[in-house]
Amino acid sequence: MEIVVLFETGEGQTRKIAGFLADQLRASGHEPTLIEATRPDAGRALAQAERVILAAPVHERRHPKRFETLVRDSREILAGRATLMMSVSLKAAFPDGLDEAHDYLTEMKMRTGFTPTRELLVAGAVRPGSYDYFQSQIVRHVLLAGQDVDLNDGVQEFTDWDALAAAARSFLADEATARSGAQ
């Protein structure tokens, strides 16, 4: 089974998540194709896939425009495959931010006209060394407002790696269920 893990990253956490998912799929006996959405051949990779995992970060309330454009332009191809969309944001790290994190995904689906088979909100990370002054103020006073997170502590990951592994297993189990039902 051809599985493509298509991702776009900002500061690197989504790349790390995509790599982790690819490792989980390999451990299950699959050979996934890991491809960045910014590559010119990304659309062709989707056309050859049987299953697709999409992963993108949220910055300024939306997923990267290039990622959304690729999803929009590939929506007919994607509609014929099992898909898992992973929306990576800091809001997903905290219970009081989950509604807003879900809104980001809903807005992306409206802009692209594509609804994935499965969806997962994934908590991202803070990487203070990659922010300019303005970005650090937004992270501190908007994204992390009311949270007990100190940017002076350096990189902090909120990603639940066990939940990601479980999502990969579940995504593969859907295929096993579909195959056994077809026999």
Image (cartoon, grey):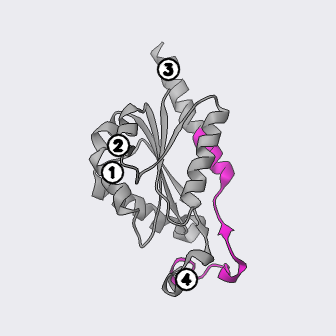
Mark 2 or mark 3, which is nearer the start of the sequence? 2
Q: Could you give the CA–CA distance between mark 3 and mark 2, rounded to whole angstroms?
A: 26 Å
Using a 10 Å C-alpha cutoff, classify the residue at mark 3 as few (fewer than 14 neighbours), some (14 to 19) or many (20 or more).
few
Examine the rendered structure and indicate whether residue 20 appears above or below residue 68: above
Front: mark 3 or 4: 4
Label 4 sits on what residue type? Answer: Ser
Residue 47 in picture, x, y percent from top left: 35, 35
Front: mark 4 or 2: 2
Provide the residue designation for mark 3. Answer: 179
Farthest front residue?
40
Q: Secondary structure at mark 4?
A: helix
Q: Which mark is residue 136?
A: 4
Using a 10 Å C-alpha cutoff, classify the residue at mark 1 as few (fewer than 14 neighbours), some (14 to 19) or many (20 or more).
some
Farthest right residue?
153
Provide the residue designation for mark 1. Answer: 70
Q: Is residue 123 visible?
A: no
Mark 4 or mark 3, which is nearer the start of the sequence? 4
Q: Which mark is residue 7?
A: none
Examine the rendered structure and indicate whether residue 155 appears above or below residue 77: below
Q: Could you give the CA–CA distance between mark 3 and mark 1, rounded to whole angstroms?
A: 29 Å
Do the CB atoms of the residues marked 2 and 1 lie less than 8 Å apart?
A: yes
Do the CB atoms of the residues marked 3 and 2 lie less than 8 Å apart?
A: no
Q: Nearer the viewer, residue 167 or 152?
A: 152
Q: Secondary structure at mark 3?
A: helix
Do the CB atoms of the residues marked 1 and 4 lie less than 8 Å apart?
A: no
Q: For the magenta stretch, what is the residue range?
A: 141-168
Q: Could you give the CA–CA distance between mark 3 and mark 4, rounded to whole angstroms?
A: 48 Å
Provide the residue designation for mark 2. Answer: 43
